[in-house]
Structures are given as C-alpha cells and as structure tokens.
Image (tube, rainbow, N blue to C red):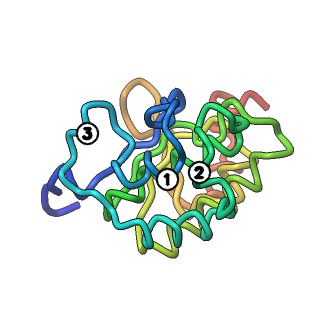
C-alpha cells in the first residue's frame, strides 16, 4: 500500500470474534455495526443488511438471536458485520477456525461471494493449506518475523524449503 488507510476503511475478522452482541438479533447487530460500545459512526441501512444476509445465504435468520445460531452461521455473521462497515480492506485471522472441515469450504465460498459483492479486498492468516491453496491469490510465508517466500500458492506451497520447514511434509 502506498498510503495509510483511515481506520473506517479497514475491518478485522478474528478467530475468536464475539459475533457482535450475542443476545441481540442478527439484524440488530448488523444495523448497529455489532460492536460493543458501538464506536463506529457507520450504521448501515436495514435494506442494505437484508441484502448482505441474502448474499451470505442467511436471509431467513435476521430476527433470530445470534446466540441461537450454530458456529458456522456465526462465522458468516462475523463476515457480514465486518462488511457492514463498508471497508475497502478486511484482515481475517483464520476465518474457518472452529468449524468442521465439512463447513470450511462453504464458509470460504460465501466469504469470497460477499467480498466480491462488496468490492472488498481481504488479507487472511491461515494455517490450513487446503484453504490457502484454494482461495489465496498470493501467499507469503513468514519465518523469524520476515517474509521468507512470496508468490502464487502453487509456487510457494511447492517450494521444498516451505514444504519441509513450514508445512512439515
């Protein structure tokens, strides 16, 4: 990046996200931005959030409390919450952690669809090489606080040093 982005242009999805205010309905979380203290000045419109729920495949859960949803759906709500702020860039820390291996590709497919819909770029940290190889356009391997290798997933994941020292194959 050649310039510093304003904080409201960036959103973060963490591995231990709190899914907004868990007692509130999905829609109330989305409209309020879902963040404790509601520190963000952006409050999306209800019709925009209904559209986002449709994009992530959860159009029927807007009135349900977040606490009633299974973990896979909560991950999708985290995605919608982050995108509700209309960032240009989203940082994700292991977006498929805590879900079954059966759910991870469905969640990532939905994430890609939502990012495309909102014209948002994503940078994600992921230790699941199946997810990395299937969804990443570029991969950087960090060791000792420095980038050891960067390139396409095919180039990086087939590098003998990366396979031996990072992946453990």
Q: CA distance from mark 3 to mark 1?
A: 15 Å
Q: Nearer the viewer, residue 101 or 58?
A: 58
47 left or right, relative to 136 = left
Taking the spot 43% from the left edge, 52% from the top edge, the residue there is 30
> Where is residue 60 shown, x and y percent of the image?
69, 60
Secondary structure of the residue carrying tag 3 is: loop
Mark 1 = which residue? 27
Label 3–label 1 contact, CB within 8 A: no
Q: Which mark is residue 38?
A: 3
Give whichever of discs 1 and 2 has the lower sequence position: 1
115 left or right, relative to 144 = right
Label 1–label 2 contact, CB within 8 A: yes
* Quarter that holds the C terminus: top right
Secondary structure of the residue carrying tag 1 is: helix
Mark 2 = which residue? 63
Q: Nearer the viewer, residue 153 or 15?
A: 15
Give whichever of discs 3 and 2 has the lower sequence position: 3
Q: Which mark is residue 61?
A: none
* Quarter that holds the N terminus: bottom left
């Amino acid at each position: 990046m050649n310039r510093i982005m304003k904080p409201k242009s960036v959103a973060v999805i963490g591995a231990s996200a709190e899914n907004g205010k868990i007692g509130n309905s999905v829609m109330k979380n989305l409209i309020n931005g879902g963040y404790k203290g509601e520190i963000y000045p952006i409050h999306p419109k209800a019709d925009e959030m209904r559209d986002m729920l449709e994009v992530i495949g959860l159009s029927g859960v807007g009135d349900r409390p977040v606490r009633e949803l299974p973990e896979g759906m909560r991950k999708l709500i985290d995605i919608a919450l982050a995108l509700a702020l209309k960032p240009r860039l989203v940082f994700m820390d292991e977006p498929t952690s805590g879900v079954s291996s059966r759910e991870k590709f469905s969640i990532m497919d939905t994430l890609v669809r939502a990012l495309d819909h909102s014209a948002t770029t994503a940078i994600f940290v992921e230790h699941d090489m199946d997810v990395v190889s299937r969804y990443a356009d570029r991969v950087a391997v960090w060791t000792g606080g420095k980038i050891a290798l960067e390139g396409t997933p095919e180039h990086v994941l087939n590098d003998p040093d990366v396979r031996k020292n990072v992946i453990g194959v």
